[in-house]
Amino acid sequence: MTIAQAVILGVIQGLTEFLPISSSGHLVIAQKLLGMEGPRLAFDVFLHLGTLIAVIVYFRKYIVDILTKDRETLIYLVIGSFPALVAGFLLKDSIENLFNAPKFVGYMLITTGAWIVLASIASALYKKRGAEKELDIVNTFLIGCAQAVSIIPGISRSGATIATGFLSGIEARTACTFAFVLSIPAVAGATALKAVKITSELAGPGSLAFMAGGLAAMLAGLASISIVLRLVQRRLFFVFGIYCLLAGFFTAFYLFR
């Protein structure tokens, strides 16, 4: 893998990890179009480490408050992380083959798109009626279940979790912030498990390209978080749903028909 290819995939990972359009789905499609094999495990670690650093840096004040003051939200994060932990243990091996099925990814992008559009409509209705809710045990668990579903390539982690927060009636900014921070335990755990398996590769001949990809993912991740929050504030979250619908139809019925 060249440094240029690593940077391209890093930017794609960083943007699509937080933009609700599925990082795994876009990486599968990009690799096929670039004629590349699926990313090496070591490179995958660097990409996810980059996006993990991005979300920690962006929400550092919120995270410190949770750890030092807001124990209730900390409990909600634990509850929300549980479904992904179970899904990772039970389904990881059976999901692996789907990363080589771009047509299936197209179908899942369509699913993500419909999910986001419906959730955007629901959020607007909750706000209009003054019926928005706070975080609680039930809606945070449901958001956690959505994160577990996002193990499927083409289902956006941020899209699924934010959309479920909207469907649960949570105020838009709160739903986004919780969804992004909820990704930290899941991504950190998965990255740590992968890193243990490939310690020798981390300092191998491709490590420079891997680091370039990780840095690109971090910088793109910071930008994408800011973009999502701004569009949510302007009630434009639905545009991501429209994009996913179009990208999914194009992928499933034209690009890989």
Image (cartoon, rainbow, N blue to C red):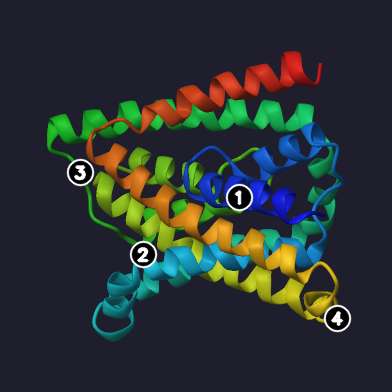
Q: Distance between the residues labelled 1 and 3?
A: 32 Å
Residue type at mark 1 is Gln
Circle nearer the N terminus (4, 2): 2
Badge 1: how crowded within 10 Å, few (<14), some, or many (20+)?
many
> Judging from the image, what secondary structure is the residue with disc 2 in?
helix
Q: Distance between the residues labelled 4 and 3?
A: 50 Å
Q: Where is residue 152 in the image (x, y as percent from the top left)?
A: 69, 45
Residue position marked by numbered label 4 in the rendering: 200
Circle nearer the N terminus (3, 2): 2
Residue type at mark 2 is Tyr
Query: How many numbered markers are drawn?
Result: 4
Q: Can residue 202 be seen in this view?
A: yes
Q: How far apart are marks 3 and 2 (CA)?
A: 25 Å
Q: Which of marks 3 and 2 is in front?
A: 2
Q: How far apart are marks 1 and 4 (CA)?
A: 23 Å
Is residue 58 toward the left or the right of residue 158 in the image?
A: left
Quadrant where the image shows the C terminus: top right
